[in-house]
Amino acid sequence: MFFEYDSYSYYVRPGFTDARKSFRTLSCIVDEEMNLDSRAKAMFIFCNKARNTLKILVWDNGYWVLTKRLEKGSFAWPSSNEEAITITKDDIKRIIQGEDIFRRLPQMARKIIY
C-alpha cells in the first residue's frame, strides 16, 4: 500500500455497522457519533453484524474505503465502548489476520526462583 502506516492513528467503532454504508455515511458516523475528525490522519475501522466484513475509512485528499470480507469465519469485534480501544498498526494487521485483540489476557507476574 502507499499509506505511511506509522503516521496514522487507528480507531475502532464498537458494535456493528451496516456494510452497505458508503464513505459519506461512514464519515458522518466518525464525525457525529465517534466525535472524531474523519479527515484527520487516522484510519477508522468498522465491522458488519455478521462480523465477516471490515471497512476502513481513510482520508487522503479524498476518502478511501478499504474492505475485507472473509469467506469463512468471523472477526473478533468489541460490542461496547468499554471493550473498544485505540489500536496500533500492529493490531490492525492482527485483526485482518483473524486474531482477537479485544480479549487480551493480563500478563502474569513472573516468579523468580533462586
Image (spheres, rainbow, N blue to C red):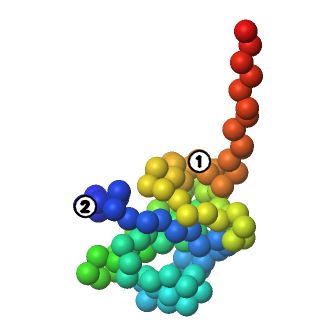
Q: For the residue carrying disc 2, how many other residues have a C-alpha within 10 Å: few (<14), some (14-19), or many (20+)?
A: few
Does any portion of residue 12 appear in the rendered image? yes
Which residue occupies 26% across, 81% down? Answer: 61
Question: Quick one: label 1, few (<14), some, or many (20+) residues within 10 Å?
Answer: some
Mark 1 secondary-structure assignment: loop
Checking the image for residue 45, the label placed there is none
Between 114 and 66, the one lying in front of the other is 114
Q: Nearer the viewer, residue 114 or 43?
A: 114
- Return the residue found at the far top: 114
- Residue 74 visible, this orientation: no
Q: Amino acid at mark 2?
A: Phe
Residue 43 horizontal/vertical position (percent): 43, 69
Q: Quadrant of residue 80?
A: bottom right
Residue located at (53% from left, 59% from top): 87
Determine whether 88 is above or below 114 in the image: below
Q: Is residue 97 left or right of residue 77?
A: left
Name the quarter where the N terminus is drawn: bottom left
Residue 114's x, y, as percent?
73, 9
State the image coordinates of residue 15 (x, y, percent, origin top left): 67, 72
